[in-house]
Image (cartoon, rainbow, N blue to C red):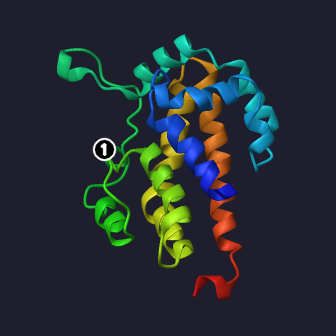
Amino acid sequence: MNDFSMVCRVLGTLFYRHPEDATLAPLLALIAEGKLAVHWPLEQDDLLRRLQQSCDLTAMAADYTRLFINTAADGGRIAAVSPLRCAWVEEGAPDVMPFLQQVGMPRGEGSADHFGALLLAGSWLEDHAQLDETAAQRQLFDSYLLPWSEGFLGKVQACASGDFYRTLAIVAREALQALREELDDVPDEARE
């Protein structure tokens, strides 16, 4: 797995999965032990230390639920921040599913419209795309992720009650910018 794929996969997983999800345990252990920084390709050491210091599963689970999980169907509350693209883009914006099907990504469980799922799609494109993955990644970022990510991440940062998701929003914002710049740095001959 290369750096682009790893960053997308780590961030996508942290946003997509509830902290109590067993599949997240190894990643959270890396963060809590301060070992993610060794493998992290971006210069974000201070932010990774803040993630490590705020890696309290109970607090993270409560914050994730409050931030992203809508329990209104139970007569309860509405999530503080919708992680779904459809809540942030104008009506009539192109749906992401036809694009993902076009590039050959298998349909997974859950919403393909979720911020974390879109980052995971970026990782999948890097690892599996048969066509020009750079063009597909650019389209994913430019059409389906970046137009709403700043508003979403800003609201996560403002609404998070703990430091973990507030810091994660900053890490993600900087990472998205670096990843998009990396896509522009791909030589022209690799684009064809």
81 sits left or right of 166 in the view: left
Residue 126 lies in what quarter of the image? bottom right
In terms of depth relative to the viewer, which is nearer, 102 or 148?
A: 102
Q: Quadrant of residue 100?
A: bottom left
Q: Is residue 108 left or right of residue 140?
A: left
Residue 5, above or below 59: below
**Residue sitting at x 76%, y 32%:** 35
Quadrant location, the N terminus:
bottom right
Q: Is residue 135 above or below residue 2?
A: below
Residue 34: give x, y in percent of width and height: 77, 27
Image coords of residue 18 (percent x, y): 45, 27
Q: Residue placed at 54% from the left, 40% from the top?
A: 153
Residue under the point 81% across and 37% down: 45
Q: Is residue 58 left or right of residue 177?
A: left
Q: Please state the horizontal and vertical placement of residue 30, each as a whole percent of the image.
A: 69, 30
Place residue 157 in its image quadrant.
top right
- The residue lying toward the viewer, choosing from 56 and 115, is 56
Amino acid marked by disc 1:
Glu
Q: Quadrant of the C terminus?
A: bottom right
**Viewer-proximal residue among 165 and 52:** 52
Question: Label 1: which residue?
Answer: 109
Neighbours of disc 1 within 10 Å: few (<14), some (14-19), many (20+)? few
Determine the secondary structure under disc 1.
loop
The residue at 71%/73% (across/down) is: 185
Q: Is residue 49 left or right of residue 102?
A: right
Residue 178: where, in percent of width, then height?
A: 69, 57
Q: How many marks?
A: 1
Q: Is residue 14 above or below residue 59?
A: below
